[in-house]
Amino acid sequence: MLPAEISDPLVAEQLQAHLPCAMIGRQIIVLDQTSSTNDAIFQVATANSNEGLVVFAEHQTAGRGQRGNRWESATGKGLWFSMLLRPKIRINDSGRLTAWAIEAIAHVIRTEFFLEPAIKLPNDVQLYGRKVAGVLVEMRAEQKAPHLAIVGIGINVNQSLEDFPLELQTRAISLAMALHLRVNRQELAVAILRNLDRTYRARFTPDG
């Protein structure tokens, strides 16, 4: 069950209703809790799985960042999601997906909130020198099919400083902290998915 403090739970049907023609977001699942959304997609993905599946979680018990770092994902306070993709790229070109995703996130933050995010390679988006979002790409080779790519995204949305562990309080920030107001997570999720869908088609699909 979702904890009572989640005042704006994500609703898969409502998200999909705003993305009627999208490839990314053609199927959306919202989980109350999972170890990590990347793990959740790998558990259900098969050679026949449709590209564009997106899995959100209100809470991750073992969210992962780059180089095995733990990603702190306070329940109901951020956007934690992964996408199943089949880009026609070599398996050692996964950095192209990371660059695409962090650029898309930064663009939405800039245009929706008039903030000026900075991209910190290889996989972070920062505000005021502190991490607001990160991307983790994992690829798996598939026989007789394009490689399977799982693109995991974490965005700090409505956390207060106290929601971060002490060791991260000088290195992490949320959009709400930067804006001094609460952000509608559902609307932000739609804006992010729309931008990801449009830019993915342009970069990674033959007829994009």
Image (cartoon, rainbow, N blue to C red):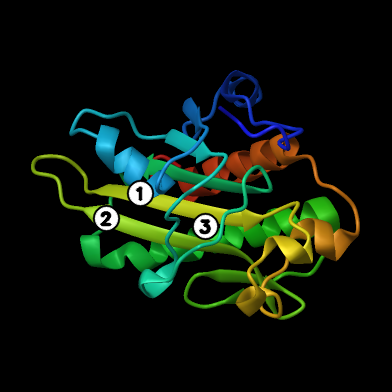
Task: Name the residue located 30 percent from the left edge and 66 percent from the top edge.
Answer: 93
Name the residue rendered at 28%, 42% in the picture. Answer: 42
Q: Amino acid at mark 3?
A: Ala
Q: Earlier in the sequence, mark 1 or mark 2?
A: 2
Q: Position of residue 140 (x, y in %)?
A: 21, 52
Q: Which residue is mark 1?
A: 150
The residue positioned 16% from the left and 51% from the top of the image is: 141
* Label 2: element kind: strand
Name the residue carrying label 2: 139
Q: Are marks 3 and 2 in contact (CB under 8 Å)?
A: no
Could you say where residue 105 lies in the image, as x and y percent from the top left? 63, 56
Q: For residue 101, which numbered disc appears in the image? A: 3
Task: Name the element at disc 3.
Answer: helix
Look at the numbered discs 1 and 2 and tell me whether their residues touch, using CB distance below 8 Å.
yes
In the shown orientation, is residue 162 left or right of residue 53? right
Is residue 26 left or right of 126 when viewed as pictured?
Answer: left
Q: Nearer the viewer, mark 3 or mark 1?
A: 1
> Residue reaching furthest right?
180
Say few, some or many: other residues with alpha carbon within 10 Å of mark 1 (under 14 / 14 to 19 / 20 or more). Answer: many
- Side of 52 relative to 159 (left or right): left
Q: Residues within 10 Å of mark 3 (few under 14, many from 20)?
A: many
Question: Mark 3 or mark 1: which comes first in sequence?
Answer: 3
Q: Is residue 62 visible?
A: yes
